[in-house]
């Protein structure tokens, strides 16, 4: 419902809230406006897709429909109204033909004469729309810049900073956790990046943890404060910034491509050669009913294990991720999209 033209600057402004935008190409195909947007990594792309798909750029119109492209890389030759490589500002602008002089999309607005097209302001947001029309977009990306989450409805008997570090660490690197002193079924979780916080909301809100459906929302806090020196804290606040257990610290880590919602099937890795199926099945059976187990045929360092339910798998992941299998091997546990 493209009532107003949407250009590269507008899309850049929206998508860069979720990570680094590298390249973009916009075009018209089958009379519909389309864009290819290359983000710096799959985590950022996933966060943008989860948060923005179905949202309107302006109130009541310009609805975003987002799918993954089959392309792995965009080949951008020119920096102009139709294509942009944000990593290479020195590209030529190509032939500034007539159609490029117009804000892109304006010429394609079927049935609209140009008088109705709002003027583009210098940074690409139509100035005639003013702040009011940007409200829908800002709601979609509200708090997209905040990396702190409020987690509520936790089991206060079982919750620990380490348990939340492990669970939320599936979706990003957890820097700090604070269980609230006066309300121990609530906690603040500070992620390394805002888009990791968005992923955690998308995948963990309303998930059952220790038998209770937890709520995960954006916190109004932008930082989790550590207790002051000498202040009693009873171990409720913990800083994990320098933890060796972060899954996403290495840029381009394979873990970025293996982020899945909670599932009954868990992916196990880092299994030493002397560890047998029975040992692992027995260890996981402490946390629920094990329905199936399978080593990867080509790589015995990895296996899939199926618990009786998603709830049991969540509990097992919290308990068994980083479980010591030898002096040098700690078990790695993630949710899987596979079935056994």
Image (cartoon, helix red, strand yellow):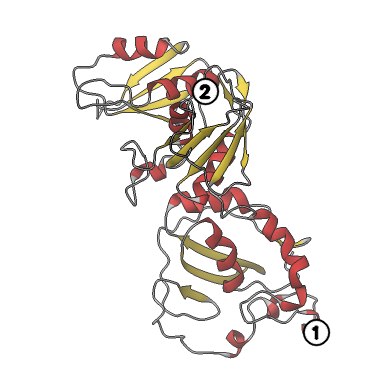
In this image, 247 relative to 181: left or right?
A: left
Name the spot of residue 15 as percent of width and height, x first.
56, 61
Asked if residue 118 is positioned above or below residue 17 in the image, the reply reads: below
Q: Indicate which disc, 2 or 1, sits on the residue closer to the N terminus.
A: 1
Q: How many marks?
A: 2
Which residue corresponds to the image point at 77% horizontal and 62% vertical from the top-left? 59
Name the spot of residue 234 as percent of width and height, x first.
48, 25
* Residue position marked by numbered label 1 in the rendering: 115
Q: Quadrant of the N terminus?
A: bottom right
How packed mark 2 is, by other alpha carbons closer than 10 Å (few <14, some 14-19, many 20 or more), is some
Between tags 2 and 1, which lies in front?
2
| Tag shown at residue 212 | none
In this image, 251 relative to 98: left or right?
A: left
Camera-nearest residue between 287 and 70:
287
Asked if residue 243 is positioned above or below residue 71 in the image, the reply reads: above
Q: Is residue 199 visible?
A: yes
Element at label 2: loop
Name the spot of residue 49 as percent of width and height, x first.
57, 51
Camera-nearest residue between 236 and 265:
236
Which residue corresponds to the image point at 55% horizontal and 44% vertical from the top-left? 148
* Residue position marked by numbered label 2 in the rendering: 159
Name the spot of residue 14 as percent of width and height, x first.
59, 63
Which residue appears farthest toward the front when viewing the image? Answer: 230
Q: Quadrant of the C terminus?
A: top left
């Amino acid at each position: 419902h493209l009532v107003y033209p949407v250009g590269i600057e507008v899309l850049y402004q929206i998508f860069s809230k979720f990570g680094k935008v590298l390249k973009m190409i916009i075009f018209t195909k089958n009379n519909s406006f389309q864009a290819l947007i290359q983000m710096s990594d799959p985590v950022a792309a996933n966060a943008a897709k989860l948060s923005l798909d179905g949202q309107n750029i302006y109130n009541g119109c310009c609805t975003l429909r987002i799918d993954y492209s089959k392309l792995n890389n965009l080949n951008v030759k020119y920096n102009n109204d139709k294509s942009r490589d944000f990593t290479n500002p020195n590209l030529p602008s190509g032939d500034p033909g007539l159609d490029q002089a117009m804000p892109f999309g304006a010429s394609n607005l079927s049935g609209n004469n140009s008088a109705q097209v709002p003027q583009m302001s210098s940074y690409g947001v139509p100035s005639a729309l003013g702040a009011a029309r940007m409200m829908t977009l800002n709601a979609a990306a509200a708090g997209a810049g905040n990396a702190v989450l409020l987690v509520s409805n936790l089991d206060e008997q079982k919750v620990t900073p380490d348990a939340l570090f492990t669970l939320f660490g599936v979706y990003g690197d957890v820097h700090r956790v604070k269980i609230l002193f006066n309300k121990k079924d609530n906690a603040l979780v500070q992620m390394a990046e805002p888009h990791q916080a968005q992923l955690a909301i998308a995948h963990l809100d309303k998930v059952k943890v220790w038998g209770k459906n937890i709520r995960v929302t954006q916190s109004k806090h932008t930082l989790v404060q550590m207790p002051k020196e000498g202040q009693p804290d009873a171990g409720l606040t913990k800083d994990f910034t320098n933890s060796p257990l972060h899954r996403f610290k290495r840029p381009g880590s394979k873990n970025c491509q293996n982020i899945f919602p909670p599932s009954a099937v868990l992916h196990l890795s880092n299994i030493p050669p002397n560890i047998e199926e029975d040992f692992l099945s027995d260890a996981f059976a402490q946390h629920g009913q094990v329905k199936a187990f399978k080593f990867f045929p080509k790589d015995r360092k990895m296996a899939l294990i199926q618990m009786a339910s998603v709830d049991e798998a969540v509990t097992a992941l919290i308990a068994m991720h980083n479980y010591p299998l030898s002096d040098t091997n700690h078990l790695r546990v993630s949710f899987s999209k596979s079935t056994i």
